[in-house]
Image (cartoon, rainbow, N blue to C red):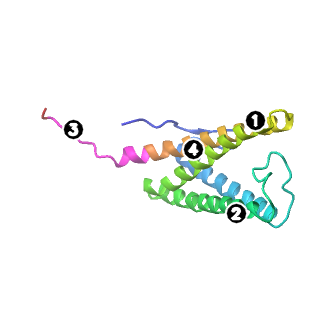
Amino acid sequence: MSTPVLESCWSPCIWASTVKSGSRAVAVYTIAMGLILITFIAYQMAGGDSTQLWNPLFEADVRGSLQVFGIIFIVILVTLIVSSVLMVIGINIWMRGLMLPWLITMALIILFQFVFGLWLIGGYYIYLDATFAALLDFLWMAYNIYCWLCVLSQYQIILQMQSPNIEILVEY
């Protein structure tokens, strides 16, 4: 059985002596991030400014594809918010299954951040601001990976505590 990846959760924004309290702080962070991004996407869908090169909806048509992809992003972010609440409940009652939706959703978001950063570099490498935006995207992705590892460590701790500790004395 593997040992947890992390024993405490330390980052510039979150510091906790245990991954349990760190995972709760990560849940608050992801809920706040989800609400802020939903507000920003809804603003763009209502006709707000989406002309920044670093914006994932930059090349989307306001009346067509922006509406479709905006709804997809909002559904993913609402899923993240709900799974953050489930994660906290799962941590409190030691039910690791309630942590899985957050781990899966956040892994998909991290994958999107990676692909988006590559898209920025590949498509707009001649623009310094796009390269800088890709760097910031990769830094944010690294922070999200650390938060993901914090929650994974709490998942591993719960898994260890719930696993039966049986030794087989007879050799087969």
Please report whichever mark, 3 or 2, sits nearer to the chain's N-terminal start: 2
Residue bearing mark 4? 148
Give the class, few, some or many, for how many residues have Cα within 10 Å of label 4's Cα (few <14, many ≥20).
some
Task: Place residue 167 in its image quadrant.
Answer: top left
Pointer 1: what residue? 121
**Gap between marks 3 and 1 measured at Cα:** 53 Å
Q: Label 3: which residue?
A: 167
Name the mark nearer the viewer: 3 or 2: 2
First in sequence: mark 4 vs mark 1:
1
Q: Position of residue 97 (x, y in %)?
A: 43, 55
* Amino acid type at image mark 4: Trp
Instruction: Name the residue type under label 2.
Output: Val
Residue 24, percent across and down? Answer: 58, 52
Q: CA distance from mark 2 to mark 1?
A: 25 Å
Magenta stretch, residue numbers: 157-169
Q: Could you say where residue 145 lies in the image, as x and y percent from the top left?
A: 60, 40
Q: Which residue is found at the position 85% from the left and 37% from the top?
A: 129
